[in-house]
Amino acid sequence: MTNLHPTARERHVVVLTGAGISADSGVRTFRDHGGLWEGHRVEDVATPEGWERDPRLVWRFYQERRRQLRSVQPNAAHTALTAFARAVVAAGHGFTLITQNVDDLHQRAGSDVLPMHGELQKLRCEACGTVVVDTLHVDPGRFVPCPECGHPRLRPHIVWFGEMPFHMAAIERALAHCTHFAAIGTSGHVYPAAGMLQQARACGAITWVQALEPPVNLDPRDRFRQGRAALAVPVLLQELAQELGLPTV
């Protein structure tokens, strides 16, 4: 679905999603106004140093999040993005979906996506590098060993603070060709994702922003659509489709 080399007649739409799009599915956000879940500090549960210091605490934290995936489903914003992407590609344009989210709701809705901060349904071996999809073993008190090398514990396949986000080369190529950009459900606080909106503007892209409240990186040039993602995103995508001359999606 992603085409990173558009011709002069093509447009390339880039969409970045954050926690706001999954909140309407009941996914708890990584941080609330008071900090991390259950009062844990970033340093304790979202850094390599925290994992080294207290792997049982970090494992329990992410296992609870992994277990929650079983109880949530994609919402109208996820499904609208899937339909929109198919219409864009069918018209001969490029489309790239990037997410900061670590849930699998975009994938379950049928979208191809670049999950820059990792994926909860995957675990990774620090000894041999094996990455496995595992949605069955979610016991917070029991580590999962590596099926390849036998290392006694896999780690969450999550990008922690201080680690390099995934798929950055593909993301940079998409942004370099971007003609239309939408930031959906993002706060504008976490980099490098927060810088993508400015990068798209610098490339001359037309920019949309959707969020419950104006994000910190909002600019007067952005077309801001306020509201819950499940309600606001389908409307925003209709506007974008009209801008591209696409049929109603």
Image: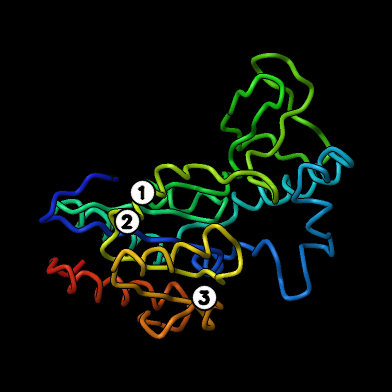
Mark whose residue sits in front, 3 or 2: 3
Q: Position of residue 177 (x, y in %)?
A: 28, 54
- Dot 3: within a 10 Å radius of its alpha carbon, few (fewer than 14), some, or many (20 or more) residues? some
Q: Position of residue 198 (x, y in %)?
A: 43, 68
The image quadrant where one finds the C terminus is bottom left
The image quadrant where one finds the N terminus is top left
Give the Cα separation between the discs numbered 1 and 3: 29 Å
Give the Cα separation between the discs numbered 3 and 2: 26 Å
- Which residue is nearer to you in this view: 196 or 124? 196
From the image, tell me which residue sits under label 2. Answer: 82
Quadrant location of residue 38?
A: bottom right
From the image, tell me which residue sits under label 3. Answer: 217
- Which residue is nearer to you in this view: 83 or 127? 127
- Color theme of the render: rainbow
- Dot 2: within a 10 Å radius of its alpha carbon, few (fewer than 14), some, or many (20 or more) residues? some
Q: Position of residue 110 (x, y in %)?
A: 36, 48
From the image, tell me which residue sits under label 1. Answer: 110
- Dot 1: within a 10 Å radius of its alpha carbon, few (fewer than 14), some, or many (20 or more) residues? some
**Residue 234 shown left or right of residue 90 in the figure:** right
Q: Tell me which residue sits at (12%, 69%) in the image.
A: 245
Q: Position of residue 2 (x, y in %)?
A: 29, 45
Q: Tell me which residue sits at (70%, 51%) in the image.
A: 161
Q: Secondary structure at mark 2?
A: helix
In this view, 115 is above or below 34: above
Q: Secondary structure at mark 3?
A: loop
Identified by mark 2, the residue type is Thr
N-terminal-most mark, 1 or 3 = 1
Mark whose residue sits in front, 1 or 3: 3
Q: Tell me which residue sits at (54%, 83%) in the image.
A: 213
